[in-house]
Amino acid sequence: MRRGGIIALAIAGVAIAAFGIIQLRPVARTNPPVTGDIAAPATIEATLRRSCYDCHSNETHWRWYSAIAPVSWMVAHHVELGRKEIDFSDWNSYYPATRRRKLEWMGRALHEEVMPPFSYRLMHPGSRLRDQDRAALEQWINTELAQSEKAPGH
């Protein structure tokens, strides 16, 4: 065997061993209890579940690739960050001002078309928001924000 072939085999062996070793560092793939899901019209709820809930709720569907490092680390990190930003499963525990701020964040994310992220849409083509989804979500957000302004104590 030529020297180049031996080096290539050695590199492949190291890569396979490294891939096996990193599998020993699993990540927590949790779904805490839902304490107060968001109340929204059926069409809005369906859109949120299809496009947002995997990262922004405690109802994440942990797919097969979320168990394989290093992808598992990235997926778990994205879900952790998503739940910190807005968690539809804990919506009722938010103070009214917090709900308002999160609705405003949703509106900005819709306007800037950053949600769902490209990497998520790539793996989940059905999560893509169509124009009518965006319009319905924007209308719902605006209605919710207007109602929060009329609420006592605002």
Image (cartoon, rainbow, N blue to C red):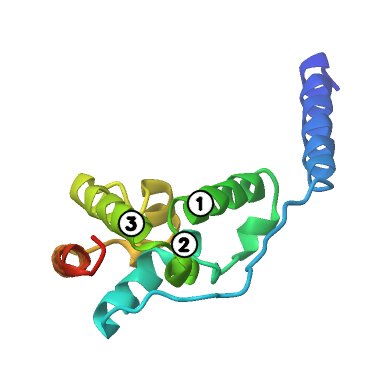
Instruction: Give the image quarter of residue 66.
Output: bottom right
Which residue is pictured at 59% across the width and 46% down the height? 77
- Is residue 77 depicted above or below 145 in this figure? above
Q: Which mark is residue 42?
A: none
* Amino acid found under the numbered disc labelled 3: Ala
Q: Quadrant of residue 13?
A: top right
Dot 1 amino acid type: Lys
Which of pointers 3 and 2 lies earlier in the amino acid sequence? 2
Across and down, in percent, residue 10 comes to: 84, 26
* Residue farthest along the front direction in this orientation: 153
- Decide: marks 3, 2 in contact (CB < 8 A)? no
Residue 37: % across, % down? 45, 76
Residue drawn where x is 42% and y is 48% of the image? 119
- Quadrant including the N terminus: top right
Which of the numbered marks, if any, corresponds to residue 84?
1
Callout 2: few (<14), some (14-19), or many (20+) C-alpha neighbours within 10 Å?
many
| The C terminus lies in quadrant | bottom left
Residue 94 at x, y = what percent?
Answer: 43, 63
Between the C-alphas of marks 1 and 2, the distance is 7 Å
**Foreground: disc 3 or disc 2:** 3
Q: Nearer the viewer, residue 141 or 9?
A: 141
Badge 3 is on which residue?
A: 97
| Dot 3 or dot 1, earlier in sequence | 1
Horizontal relation, residue 9 to residue 50: left or right: right
Quarter location, residue 2: top right
Residue for point 61% across, 52% down: 76
Looking at the picture, tell me which residue is in the foreground, 143 or 122.
143
Label 3, label 2: how many angstroms apart (C-alpha)?
15 Å
Q: Amino acid at mark 2?
A: Asp
The residue that disc 2 covers is 87
